[in-house]
Amino acid sequence: MEIEIISFGKISEFISNQRIIVDGVNDTDGLKTHLEATFPLLSGTKYKFALNKTIVQGNSQITHNDIVAIMPPFSGG
């Protein structure tokens, strides 16, 4: 399955925006495991996912051509 990864803030320093192919990954929990194995610096970073422009609160299904944003913590002000 192919998905698009968009990264923000400090995360974009080690994960560039890209289209990646992930086999055997069907949800955001699986994607988290895959990305932290591929980009070890991510495992020591707090972040959230947004799936197709909606922030993910729990584990969510991922399908072909989805867009996943990886965002560091942020606050309003």
Image (cartoon, rainbow, N blue to C red):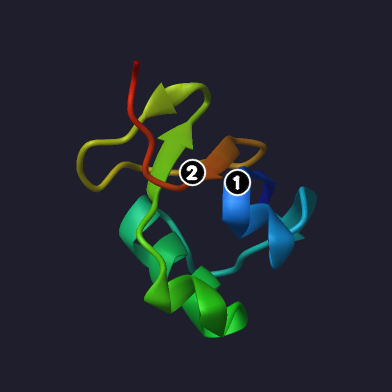
The answer to which image quadrant residue 39 occupies is: bottom right
Q: Residue furthest left?
A: 58
Residue at 42% across, 43% down: 49
Q: Are marks 1 and 2 in contact (CB under 8 Å)?
A: yes
> Label 2: which residue?
71
Would residue 20 be found to the left or right of residue 58 on screen?
right
Q: Quadrant of the C terminus?
A: top left
Q: Badge 1: how crowded within 10 Å, few (<14), some, or many (20+)? A: few
- The numbered mark, 1 or 2, whose residue comes first in the sequence reads 1
Q: Name above or below for residue 22 compared with residue 65.
A: below
Q: Amino acid at mark 2?
A: Met
Residue 51 locus on image (x, y percent): 46, 33
Q: Label for residue 68?
A: none
Left or right of 42: which side holds 3? right
Q: Secondary structure at mark 2?
A: strand
Judging depth in this view, the residue of 71 and 74 nearest the camera is 74
Q: In this rendering, would 8 be left or right of 72?
A: right
Residue 34 seen in render: no
Relative to 29, is 70 on the left or the right?
A: right
> Whole-percent x and y of residue 44?
40, 77
Residue 14 figure quarter: bottom right
Across and down, in percent, residue 6 comes to 67, 42
**22 and 18: which one is in front?**
18
CA gap between label 1 and label 2 equals 7 Å
Dot 2: few (<14), some (14–19), or many (≥20) neighbours within 10 Å?
Answer: some
- Residue type at mark 1: give it: Gly
The residue shown at (44%, 34%) is 50
Q: Is residue 64 visible?
A: yes
Q: Nearer the viewer, residue 37 or 8?
A: 8
Is residue 19 shown above or below 34? above
Q: Which residue is mark 1?
A: 9
